[in-house]
Image: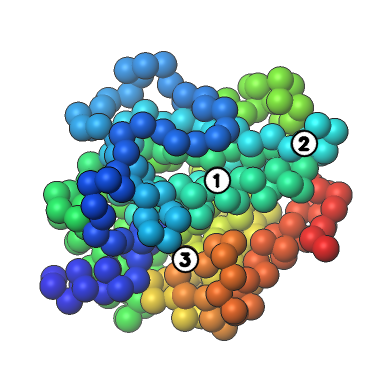
Amino acid sequence: MAKLARRWIALASIGVAVAPLSPAASARAPATGGKIIPLYAKGGVPSLGVPEVRDRMKTGETMIYDVSEPTLELYRPAPGRANGTAVIVAPGGGFVALGYTFGGTDVAQALAGRGVTAFVLKYRTIRSGDGPMRMPDVHMKEMGIVMSRAETGRPMEMPRFAGEPHAIEDGARAMAIVRERAREWGIDPHKVGMIGFSAGAYLAADLAIGAKASRPDFVGLIYGGLRTPVPEDAPPAFIAGAADDEYQRNDPVLLYTAWRQAGASAELHLYERGSHGFDLHAKGTTSDHWFNEFVWWLQFHGLVKTTAN
C-alpha cells in the first residue's frame, strides 16, 4: 500500500494530480468564468455531507473534491462563430475529484474557439479521504486493481468505480438539458457530443453504449478505459491514448477493437509517448497534436468547418 501511495504521488490517479497544499491554496467557492447551469434543483440529489473544496495546484490545475451539486459550465463561441455543434467536456479524477482546468475549462475554451458550444460537466464525486492526498480507502483499492491490471492485463475490463453510477446519472442529465435547451443556445440537438478524459472518458463510454435517449451523438475517449458491450449503433468515437500510459496503455486498442467489432465507427490515435494525462500543454511528444486531430475528425464528420492553422 505504501508503494502504491508513492506511485500515486509521482504520477496521477486516473487523472488526479496530487501534491500537498497549504491552506491558502484551497477555496470553498467557485472561481470560474462561464455561465453555471445546475443539473438538478437544490437538494435534488443526496449530499455527501461535506463542503465542496477546490484546490489550486502549483501547476495551474484546479482540483475539485466532494462534489454534491453537479453543474454544467457554458462556454459559447464568439458572436457569429457558432456552428451548431455542442460538446460536453467531462474531466478526469478517478471519480474522487475533477481536474477541472486542464481537462475541463481549457478544452471547453479551445472548442469554443472552433465554433463549438462547449460545456464543462462537474459531475458528482465520492467523498474524499483525510490528509493531503485526499484518497478514500475505496479508491486505494480501486487503484490497486488498476495497477495490477496494467501489469497483467487482467481483468480485461476494469470493474465499475464506486463513483461511476452517479457520474453516469449526471452525464445523462447533462445530455438531456443540452438537448432540451438546444434552441436557446443555437445548438443542433442532433450534434451534441461528449469528450472525456480518463475517468471522464469512462463516463463518456458508459453513455455511448447505454440507453439511446442519453447517448451522445459522438464521443472523444481520451486516455480512458474499456466499457462493453458496444452496440452496433454506438456513436462515432475518437479514441486517443499513449503507449507509455502507466495505468491504461492497452485500453485505447481495446476500445477501438470493441467499437469496430460492433460495426460502429471509430478512429484510434495511440501515441508513442504522452503517459497518462496529456492535455493542451505541450509535452514535446506527438500527443501534443491530439486536439488538432480531434478537430480534423470533427470536420470529417461535418461537425466543424475549420481546422487548426
- The quarter of the picture where residue 57 lies is bottom left
Which residue is at the far front? 24
Q: Which residue is mark 2?
A: 78
The residue located at (69%, 34%) in the rendering is 76
Q: Earlier in the sequence, mark 3 or mark 2?
A: 2
Measure how far apart labels 1 and 3 are at the Cα level. Answer: 15 Å
Q: Is 201 located above or below residue 179 in the figure?
A: below
Q: Nearer the viewer, residue 203 or 131?
A: 131
Q: Is 262 located above or below residue 272 in the figure?
A: above
Quarter of the picture containing the C terminus is: bottom right
Q: Which residue is mark 3?
A: 277
The residue located at (60%, 51%) in the rendering is 107
Amino acid carrying label 1: it is: Thr
Q: Is 63 located above or below residue 254 in the figure?
A: above
Amino acid carrying label 3: it is: Gly
Kindly state the secondary structure of the residue where label 1 is placed. helix
Quarter of the picture containing the N terminus is: bottom left
Dot 3, how many residues are within 10 Å of its Cα: few (below 14), some (14-19), or many (20+)?
A: many
Amino acid carrying label 2: it is: Ala
Color theme of the render:
rainbow
The location of residue 123, given as percent across then percent down, is 42, 38
The location of residue 221, given as percent across then percent down, is 56, 58
- The quarter of the picture where residue 179 lies is top right
Q: Which residue is mark 1?
A: 105
Q: Earlier in the sequence, mark 1 or mark 2?
A: 2
